[in-house]
Image (cartoon, helix red, strand yellow):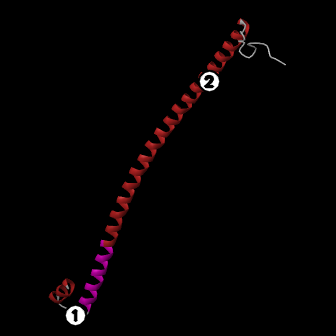
Amino acid sequence: MSRPKGSKNKKTLLSEAMLDDKIAAAAAAKKKLAAEEKKLLSTMDDVKAQLKAKKKELRAAERTLAVLQEKKAQADAVAAAAAQQKEIEKVVSSLVSSGKTATEILDMLNN
């Protein structure tokens, strides 16, 4: 059976109503995507603001931690010096009670 000439190449013309429907559907899709984009951008701005605030809090906490660690190191140094002083006083008092002279005690402490 032979086929009619040009049947495959026949162009279909869209009616004006079909074009209007497709244009309206495309416009609605564009409007919906634009609204979603605006919502996502708004959410991103909120998250960026939260991140900025958290970074600021973190820097403040790091500074506070550094200050407290420095104070602890100073307090430990003072406590170590006080303990050493007490130990020296204990040794000196035991040497004095044993009858050592001041020069002998100084020589012992310097060694």
Q: Is residue 107 above or below residue 37?
A: below
Q: Quadrant of the N terminus?
A: top right
Residue 43: x %, y % from top left: 56, 31
Residue 60: x %, y % from top left: 41, 46
Which amino acid lies under the numbered mark 2 shown in the image of this protein?
Leu
* Disc number placed over residue 99 in the picture, else none: 1
Residue named by callout 2: 33
**Is label 2 in a helix, a strand or a loop?**
helix
Mark 2 Cα-neighbour bin, 10 Å: few <14, some 14–19, many ≥20: few
Q: Is residue 69 left or right of residue 4?
A: left
**Is label 1 in a helix, a strand or a loop?**
loop
Residue 69 falls inside the magenta stretch? no
Residue 34: x %, y % from top left: 59, 22
Q: Which residues are magenta?
A: 81-97
Q: Residue furthest left?
A: 103
Q: Is residue 4 left or right of residue 28?
A: right
Tell me which numbered mark, 2 or 1, is placed earlier along the sequence: 2
Q: Is residue 67 above or below residue 55?
A: below
Residue 57: x %, y % from top left: 45, 44
Which residue is at 41% across, 51% downward? 62
Mark 1 Cα-neighbour bin, 10 Å: few <14, some 14–19, many ≥20: few
Q: Name the one closer to the observer, 50 or 22.
A: 22
Q: Name the one closer to the observer, 96 or 33.
A: 33
The answer to whether marks 2 and 1 mark residues whose Cβ atoms lie closer than 8 Å is no
Q: Residue furthest bottom?
A: 99
